[in-house]
Image: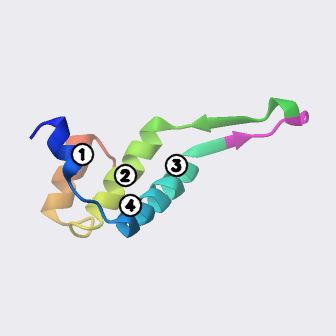
Amino acid sequence: MDRKDLEEVPRSSMGAEIMNERIQQLIQQATRVIEPDDPDYRQEIFDKKLFAELIVKECASFVGDENSQAVKKMFKHFGIEE
């Protein structure tokens, strides 16, 4: 399947909105805000490792519980601590 084929695959706009909303929630969970005394120096630090871990855990929740062999293999494959 080439790029052209991928672009022609119909998408459900509702599904995309739900995915984007959930991804936004995971991004927020993986972002730490540092607010010093001076608001001009406010920082947001995005933790890529935590974001990846949250996505893997989210996907694993659809496979089974944390004790299932499939989830254990998935966590091991991605280096996620249980």
Kind of residue sitting beneath label 1? Glu
**Label 1 belongs to which residue?**
7
Q: In terms of secondary structure, where does tag 3 sit?
A: helix
Q: Which residue is mark 3?
A: 27
Q: Is residue 43 in view from this perspective?
A: yes
x then y, percent, for residue 5: 15, 44
Q: What separation in Å lies between label 2 and label 1 (alpha carbons)?
A: 24 Å
Mark 2 neighbour class, 10 Å CA radius: few under 14, some 14 to 19, many 20 or more: some
The first of marks 3 and 2 along the sequence is 3
Packing grade of label 1 (10 A; few <14, some 14-19, many >=20) is few
Q: Look at label 2 and name its amino acid.
A: Ile
Which numbered disc flags the more N-terminal residue, 3 or 4? 4
Magenta region includes residue 17: no
- Horizontal and vertical percent position of residue 77: 20, 43
* Residue 36 falls within the magenta-colored stretch: yes
The span from disc 4 to disc 1 (Cα, nearest Å) is 14 Å
Q: Which residues are magenta?
A: 33-39
User: Residue at (30%, 66%) from the top-left corner?
Assistant: 61
Q: Name, please, the residue furthest toward the right.
A: 37
Position above or below: 34 against 74: above
Residue assigned mark 2:
55
44 vs 59: above or below = above
